[in-house]
């Protein structure tokens, strides 16, 4: 149980990339008041938590209704996470998060909590894929203890992201953009290895069931 908690926490932390939120949040809220920054960070975190909880509860039913095996989804999820890892390693703008048009739109909005903070930064495709991968085989009714253990790990990552957004201004003065890029590249290498393991496990399980 502890091993599952730690493994999921690390993977989800790497996918959400709280470190990468620091320059994003700092840039989107530049010149804003502290009250505005706190409201945006808090609302974004709460919305992201609601999205994650919804996917965690309905994940198994969704896969079953679509006729998708967890092994097939594990392979696709691993490939998607591998692309996210490559973007982290090469410090590229993530195509799995926002497009150029979406960025322009976000700058026009006064409320940035739902878009782009809650989605797609905190609970984007990579994060939701990870939720479906881990919660797909785990039901709140059949395995409640495991379900809430994993859910606690996900909420813990959200709390860390919230704290980093609140501390974005101080962190930017300390580590700057270069520091966040270096940290993201190191984390990207770890995520890439975990993504490959997802694919390997999915392929192995698929062939063993034939």
Image (cartoon, helix red, strand yellow):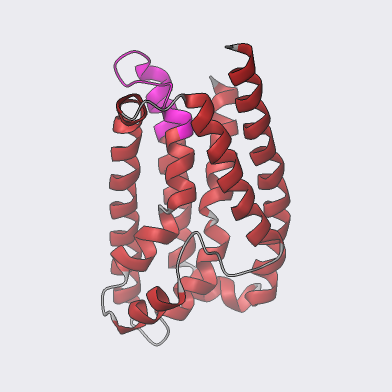
The location of residue 152, given as percent across then percent down, is 41, 34
Nearer the observer, 37 or 147: 147
**Is residue 67 rendered to the left or right of residue 88?**
left
The location of residue 136, given as percent across then percent down, is 41, 27
Nearer the observer, 204 or 43: 204
Q: Is 41 part of what is drawn in magenta?
A: no
**Is residue 169 rendered to the left or right of residue 152?**
right
Q: How many marks?
A: 0
In the image, farthest residue toward the front: 210
In the image, farthest residue toward the bottom: 31
Q: Is residue 135 above or below residue 15?
A: above
Q: Residue at x 40, y 42 (%)?
A: 155
**Is residue 61 rendered to the left or right of residue 190?**
left
Q: Residue at x 63, y 12 (%)?
A: 208
Position of the C terminus by quadrant: top right
Residue numbers of the magenta segment: 133-151
The location of residue 206, given as percent across then percent down, is 59, 20
The location of residue 52, given as percent across then percent down, is 35, 43
**Corner quadrant of residue 55:** top left
Q: Residue at x 39, y 24 (%)?
A: 147
**Corner quadrant of residue 84:** bottom right
Q: Residue at x 28, y 54 (%)?
A: 47
Q: Is 146 part of what is drawn in magenta?
A: yes
Viewer can see residue 162: no
Viewer can see residue 175: yes
Q: Is residue 28 above or below residue 62?
A: below
Nearer the observer, 33 or 40: 40
């Amino acid at each position: 149980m502890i091993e599952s908690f730690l493994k999921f926490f690390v993977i989800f932390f790497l996918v959400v990339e709280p470190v990468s939120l620091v320059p994003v949040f700092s840039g989107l809220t530049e010149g804003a008041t502290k009250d505005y920054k706190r409201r945006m960070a808090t609302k974004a975190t709460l919305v992201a938590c609601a999205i994650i909880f919804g996917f965690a509860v309905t994940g198994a039913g969704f896969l079953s209704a679509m006729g998708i095996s967890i092994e097939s989804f594990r392979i696709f999820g691993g490939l998607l996470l591998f692309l996210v890892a490559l973007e982290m390693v090469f410090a590229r703008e993530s195509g799995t998060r926002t497009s150029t048009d979406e960025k322009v739109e976000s700058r026009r909005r006064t409320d940035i909590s739902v878009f782009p903070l809650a989605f797609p930064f905190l609970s984007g495709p990579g994060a939701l894929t990870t939720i479906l991968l881990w919660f797909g085989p785990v039901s709140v009714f059949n395995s409640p203890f495991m379900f809430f253990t994993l859910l606690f790990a996900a909420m813990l990552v959200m709390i860390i992201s919230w704290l980093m957004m609140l501390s974005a201004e101080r962190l930017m003065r300390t580590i700057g953009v270069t520091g966040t890029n270096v940290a993201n590249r190191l984390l990207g290498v770890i995520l890439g290895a975990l993504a490959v393991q997802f694919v390997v496990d999915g392929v192995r399980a698929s062939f063993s069931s034939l």
